[in-house]
Every structure is written in C-alpha cells, then in structure tokens.
C-alpha cells in the first residue's frame, strides 16, 4: 500500500492483562524498531519490546493528552521514514474510542503503509473477568458501547431516548466523571432506576476493583470508594448475573446490593 517498505502497526494491547494480547500483536511487538504507547498500556506489555527498540510514551489518558493528537499523527509519519517497523500500541482495541482511525487516516494521507491489529476491548475483557455477560437470552438482546467523555461542565450530547432501552446492555467508556449525569439523564429518559449497574476499575489487572449497584445508586456508591481510572461502567439487566457468574470469587464493593439480590432471586 505504501511507497516505503516500512510499516506502522496500529496495535490493540487489550485491557491490561498481557496474556490477553493476540499472537499477532505479540509477534509485531517483538520485532518492533520503535513503539509509541500511551497510559492505558500496561508496563508488562511495553516490556515485551526488544531492548534496542525506541520507546516513546505519549501519555494519553482520557482528557489529558501529554502530546496533542496531531503531533502523535506527525510522529508516526516521521518514525515510519526512519524505522522499518513502527508499533503504535493502544489500550483495548485501536478502533474503539482509541482515535486509531484518525491516526490511520493521517498515515493513509501521507502514503505510509499501515496495518491494524485488533485488541480485546475493555468491554469484552471486563465482561470475562467479572463474569458479567454482555448479552444473555431474556436479559439483553444487544449491547451498545457509548462514550461518556465530555468536556468540563458541558452536558453530554447523547441520544438519551434511544439509550434508555432496558433490553440493551450499555457499556460506558470514559464515563466516570460524568456518571451522575449519565445516571440522571437515563432515568429521566425512562430507564428504571433499579436497573443493575456496575463499575470496574483497572479491569483484568491485579488492581481490578468492581462495584455492583443500581443505575440510581452507582454514582453515590462510587463516591465512597476510591476508584482510580480507567473505569468502565456496565448498565443493564445482565449485571444481575454478576454474583452467580463470579468465577474468580471477586469481592464486590456495593451499595444497593440487597435490592439487587432480591431481584436476581425473584
Ligand atoms: N480503545 C480502548 C478504549 C479507550 S477509551 C478499548 O478498546 O478498550 C478509555 C476508556 O476505556 C477508559 O476511560 C475506560 O472507560 C475504558 N478502559 C480501558 N481499559 C480499561 C480497564 N483495564 N479497566 C477499566 N476500564 C478500561
């Protein structure tokens, strides 16, 4: 595709656990000449790259970019000129809220060869580690990945009516700061305040913590818990299976659990 023999690999690093890397991602990392990564990528994964490889940290966390996106784009083009194999390593999957497609567009417009290597997105990784399925017959006929990212005091611009659907699981990325607004607006749009809801911090890593509650009470529950990002929120009836399918024997921080247990057994 490109004019040079070099290639930029946009690689999904998965949600944190290094064992959740694909074999392809692992191979490309082992052969990289330069790696550009951000905050969501765990150190254990960065350590896979060989000693001679250039490592560039661009420190991107939600809403806090150490290097602006256009400079990251430029950096990738520049690295492709002087390196054979450049890896742009991103948390989860590069094409789910990762701005991977913006980077790919920039590379394409500069005739730089690129390849996309998918990763396990946070929703799938956390679903597996907590045991909360994203769909379940009779509880959820579909799942929606939604961004809860919003600037400062600005209200979120989401289609609340369509999101307030009790038969769909909602997975909220980057939603911790706006969780009170999300909860309020979904309830106002018709979603039951008793809808089971969970928040999971640092999913799939040794630092994973989880809280199960209800849509109405989750923001309150999280206020009492020192949850450090990244945090993913799951809203929907599938969350009621958290305890039964808790195969790792996780401890759930909780508020409103009694109500939830009553609903599960009802
Ligand atoms: N491309 C990534 C998402 C990037 S947006 C993916 O596919 O997973 C960043 C958001 O992802 C965080 O704010 C958080 O909501 C979620 N996230 C990513 N990794 C996570 C983890 N290990 N635990 C909890 N949430 C995570």
Image (cartoon, rainbow, N blue to C red):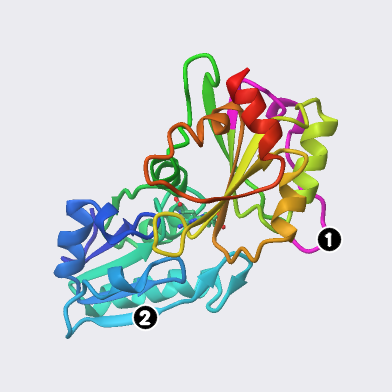
In what element is the residue under mark 1? loop
213 or 2: which is nearer to us?
213
Helix, strand or loop: magenta stretch: loop
Furthest residue toward bottom: 52
Asked if disc 1 and disc 2 are in contact, CB closer than 8 Å, the reply is no
Q: Position of residue 20 (x, y in %)?
A: 28, 52
State which region is magenta: 151-169
Q: Nearer the viewer, mark 1 or mark 2?
A: 1
Is residue 20 found left or right of 252 in the rendered image?
left
- Mark 1, residues whose alpha carbon is within 10 Å: few (<14), some, or many (≥20)? few
Place residue 150 in its image quadrant: bottom right
66 or 121: which is nearer to us?
121
Q: CA distance from mark 1 to mark 2?
A: 32 Å
Query: At 28% across and 67% down in the image, what residue appears?
Result: 87
26, above or below 46, in the image: above
Query: At 38% across and 46% down in the image, what residue appears?
Result: 248
Query: At 19% across and 60% down in the image, what residue appears?
Result: 26
Is residue 81 found left or right of 57 in the rendered image?
left
In what element is the residue under mark 2? strand
Q: Quadrant of the C terminus?
A: top right
Q: Position of residue 233 (x, y in %)?
A: 60, 46
Residue 168's label in the rendered image is: none
Place residue 160 in its image quadrant: top right
151, above or below 210, in the image: below
9 or 206: which is nearer to us?
206
Whether residue 152 appears in magenta in the rendering, the answer is yes
Q: Where does label 2 land, which residue?
A: 56
- Mark 2, residues whose alpha carbon is within 10 Å: few (<14), some, or many (≥20)? few
Q: Position of residue 88 (x, y in %)?
A: 34, 66
Place residue 214 in its image quadrant: top right
Q: Earlier in the sequence, mark 1 or mark 2?
A: 2
Q: Where does label 1 land, which residue?
A: 153
């Amino acid at each position: 595709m490109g004019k040079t023999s070099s290639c930029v690999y946009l690689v999904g690093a998965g949600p944190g656990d290094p064992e959740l890397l694909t074999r392809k991602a692992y191979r490309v990392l082992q052969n990289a000449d330069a790696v550009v990564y951000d905050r969501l990528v765990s150190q254990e994964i960065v350590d896979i790259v060989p000693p001679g490889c250039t490592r560039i940290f661009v420190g991107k966390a939600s809403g806090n970019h150490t290097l602006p996106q256009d400079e990251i784009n430029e950096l990738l083009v520049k690295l492709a000129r002087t390196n054979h194999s450049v890896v742009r390593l991103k948390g989860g999957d590069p094409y789910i809220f990762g701005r991977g497609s913006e980077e790919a567009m920039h590379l394409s417009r500069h005739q730089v060869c690129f390849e996309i290597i998918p990763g396990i997105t946070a929703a799938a990784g956390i679903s597996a580690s907590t045991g909360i399925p994203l769909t379940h017959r009779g509880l959820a006929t579909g799942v929606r990945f939604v961004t809860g990212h919003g600037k400062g005091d600005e209200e979120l611009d989401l289609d609340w009516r369509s999101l307030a659907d009790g038969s769909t699981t909602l997975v909220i990325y980057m939603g911790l700061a706006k969780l009170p607004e999300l909860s309020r607006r979904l309830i106002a749009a018709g979603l039951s305040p008793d809808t089971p809801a969970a928040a999971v911090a640092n999913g799939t890593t040794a630092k994973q913590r989880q809280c199960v509650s209800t849509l109405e009470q989750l923001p309150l529950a999280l206020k009492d818990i020192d949850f450090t990002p990244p945090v993913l929120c799951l809203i929907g009836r599938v969350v009621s299976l958290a305890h039964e399918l808790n195969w790792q024997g996780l401890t759930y921080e909780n508020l409103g659990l009694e109500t939830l247990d009553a609903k599960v057994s009802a």
